[in-house]
Image: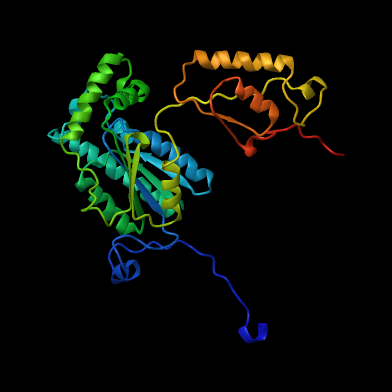
Amino acid sequence: MSGAFGELTQTPLQKVWIPRTSKRLQQRRGSSVPQFTNSPTMVIMVGLPARGKTYISKKLTRYLNWIGTPTKVFNVGQYRREAVQTYKNYEFFRPDNEEAMQIRRQCALAALRDVQTYLSVEEGQVAVFDATNTTRERRTLILQFAKENGYKVFFIESICDDPDIIQENIKQVKLTSPDYKDCNRDEVVEDFLKRIECYQKTYQPLDDDLDRSLSYIKIFNVGSRYLVNRVQDHVQSRTVYYLMNIHVTPRSIYLSRHGESELNLRGRIGGDSGLSERGTQYACALAGFIRSQCIRDLKVWTSHMKRTIQTAEALHVPYEQWKALNEIDAVRTNRK
């Protein structure tokens, strides 16, 4: 058999970046969006300020790196802060402020150059472009950049019209922003709301008809509804899956061991015994603490073990049992 086919050889797969202008460009692409399996991806954030774009960018970047996809976030706001050392007020973001508009455009272009370096030279796979990108003109510029460099593009638009969520996001995030160093809370909220108004004047959301050929996900009111369009590949499908399973607003997670078990009294590890008397006291004390926190929509998870279920039952709320939580990090013994 080996004589019939000769020696088999394998050439290592390498990324090939297509020239910006050539006949081969259209022949190999076949469309406005690259179709190569190994083409890098640009994830483009879209949305007004205080919609959780930076939070989503950081979380998504961390997730994609965790699953083995080299990813880096490029925050255009940071480029702007480096270019303009002192932030005065919202007037910098007025659409009729031509000088500031030019600075902001140059910052976006600088970020795109760094994206190109990361994806084409440093062999990154995904670049998350974290900016408002609220105009069709800006998104067209990004699409042209991606087309010239052979990158796939996926848009994430965060839409929120709930004033309570917006106010909470401003208080949670913008109060600690470098733009508002040494400013009091009321000044920050007032200025930032005016900044949002500046963007609203020129905001052009992704359009279901005009942008039907693009790949994107729209997130409404931090996850109350989603709209997904033309997901292309594995990276984009994993991105959609992740975005539909995260919470943009802050949440608290309480971790607790079960109360003391009968086998704990004997110094034994494992087994499936119930709670001891002190374990029951602990469960009651835990329930009192949780009630004092006044947690809305509390969700409780336990393992399948009797001792954890008895601890959870003291809370008098519904709970879910997960086999994956059985004996987490049980003591390991070293065998000689």
Q: How many marks?
A: 0
Image quadrant in which you'd find residue 149:
bottom left
Q: Which of the colour schemes (rainbow, by chain, secondary structure, one colour) is used?
A: rainbow
Question: Who's the residue at 19% across and 34% down the image?
Answer: 200
Q: Position of residue 265 (x, y in %)?
A: 80, 19
Question: Who's the residue at 23% across and 24% down the image?
Answer: 193
Q: Nearer the viewer, residue 261 or 61?
A: 261
Q: Position of residue 143 (x, y in %)?
A: 28, 53
Question: Who's the residue at 50% across and 44% down the image?
Answer: 65
Q: Nearer the viewer, residue 335 or 140?
A: 335
Q: Is residue 53 visible?
A: yes
**Residue 232 as seen in the image, left or right of residue 104:** right
Q: Position of residue 172 (x, y in %)?
A: 37, 23
Q: Indicate whether 181 appears above or below 48.
A: above
Image quadrant in which you'd find residue 40:
bottom left
Q: Nearer the viewer, residue 313 or 205?
A: 313
Q: Indicate whether 36 appears above or below 4.
A: above
Quadrant housing the C terminus: top right
Q: Indicate whether 209 appears above or below 247.
A: below
Quadrant housing the N terminus: bottom right
Q: Residue furthest bottom?
A: 4
Q: Residue furthest right?
A: 336
